[in-house]
Image: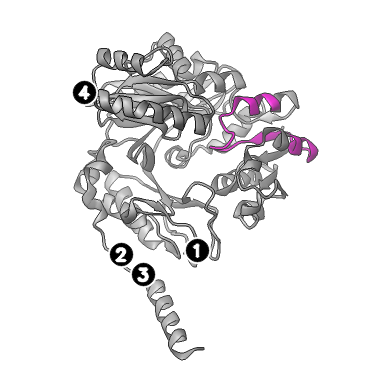
Amino acid sequence: MIRKILIANRGEIAVRIIRACAEMGIRSVAIYTEADRFSLHVKKADEAYSLGEDPLAGYLNVHRIVNLAVATGCDAIHPGYGFLSENAEFAEVCARRGVIFIGPSAVVIRRMGDKTEARKAMIAAGLPVTPGTEENLTDVEQALEVAEDLGYPVMLKATSGGGGRGIRRCDDSGELRHNYDRVISEATKAFGRADVFMEKCVVNPRHIEVQVLADAHGNAIHLYERDCSIQRRNQKLIEIAPSPQLDEAQRQYIGGLSVIAAKAVGYQNAGTVEFLLDEHDRFYFMEMNTRVQVEHTITEAITGVDIVEEQIRIAAGLPLRFQQHEVQRRGFAMQFRVNAEDPKNDFLPSFGRISRYYAPGGPGVRTDTAIYTGYEIPPHFDSMLAKVVVWALGWEDVINRGERALRDMGLSGIRHTIPYYLEILRHPDFRGGHFDTGFVEGHPELLNYSLKLQRHEIAAVLAAAIVAHTGQ
């Protein structure tokens, strides 16, 4: 069994993994750079080690992290999401040094991380894919020829892309010429590769993904789907499980496809198969994420399965504890990514000190975060502060609980996205379960909310005014 795990990540996902380790009787080792010295994951781990002054370099140093794992007696490394989580070299170095990588093999990471190779693998497995190029594009002239054959609009995508980066929609040849070099530049900066390919654009689809688990003994199951259609510029904002837009036949179909996909590539551990669903209810494979997802929480809420614990068990060589027919879902769950951004100012990041914070509670409410009152948000990382997760038996119930939980949450000192999410929850199309990836862009009026101070904020303003007036 695994006895000690180094968490090669930071923030809320590191805290999440530390908690799973504590429940399994496994010692946890945190890493941090100077910007994260006072982060919650550093405080909660059994051991914590500095990786230096540079805020980002330490989290991306494969050999230093693996060397530290070996030096501290760790059996395994959990990469979380982002950073090195889908880095095949990281998995290879772990294998060479005798450290278990909690995730799929380097071969699978490399294959599914290359979007053109992933398309080929899924075509061979019989999955429907969006029409597009089977190989990378050679230059803009070839891109123009392919676009004419596919018909506009088309999507330019970085072959090694992920997280919504390196993607541009092109509605005509002029936009394609303009965006081609931009995607090349984005791909090179973000992923170290200049390769891009092209797909036919599915206009305003629904974004549906399926959580899968697969072990080393040939067992693979799905844990139902999540609807990630509420997004802005390919960045997810609100996620829902299961999708209120699918019927039972569609749910079984897409779940079955995802298990086929996992088995076709010899997948092991937790993964997510992502699809687009067009206006004619046709599914198209989009990509496979070879790591735990930010939104794994809502799948846990509807199934009762601890996905991080299952990741660790699978990495230890244990078989899955349940078969497909034993996985039951119940109710609806919704996750809100509370970001340090100002929606009224084009979602500009809002870094600084959190002057007051308290988490929402009550039935069916979970908050995953690494912030606390007095915490200084470093400007070097992603802007997500917390994940507020709500569960309820019915669709209308989970919306109402989401409203209540977001209003209950106390968060002062920075701008954040909670008021914007409350507007989304009140919109009749959302409440009716009718939305797609164009929802946010199609409803600019959602930004016309008024900021109302909560009681504790009013008290703080009054106190500051009194001090300023009296000089005390």
Task: Please rate how many residues cluster around mark 1, counting C-alpha atoms within 10 Å: few if below 14, some from 14 to 19, many from 20.
Answer: some
Which class describes the residues within 10 Å of circle 4: few (<14), some (14-19), or many (20+)? few
Of pointers 2 and 4, the one earlier in the residue sequence? 4
Residue name at image x 28 percent, y 50 percent: 425
Residue at image mark 4? 280
Q: Which residue is mark 3?
A: 454
Q: Amino acid at mark 3?
A: Gln
Say above or below: 471 vs 311: below
Check disc 1 and report the residue beneath it.
354
**For the residues bearing labels 4 and 3, Cβ distance under 8 angstroms:** no
Is there CB contact under 8 Å for labels 2 and 4? no
Judged by depth in the image, the label closer to the viewer, 3 or 2, is 2
Q: Is residue 83 visible?
A: yes
Q: CA distance from mark 3 to mark 2?
A: 9 Å
Q: Secondary structure at mark 3?
A: loop
User: Gap in Å between the C-alphas at discs 2 and 1?
Assistant: 18 Å
Q: In the image, what residue type sits under mark 4?
A: His
Residue 213 x/y as whole percent: 52, 27
Q: Which residues are magenta?
A: 67-93
Location of residue 246 with respect to 217 vertically, above or below: below
Mark 2 closeness class: few <14, some 14–19, many ≥20 residues within 10 Å: few
Name the element at disc 4: loop
Mark 2 lies on a secondary structure that is: loop
- Dot 1 falls on a residue whose secondary structure is loop
Residue 136's spot in the image, x, y percent? 43, 16
> Is 230 on the left-hand or right-hand side of 299?
left
Residue 451 image label: 2
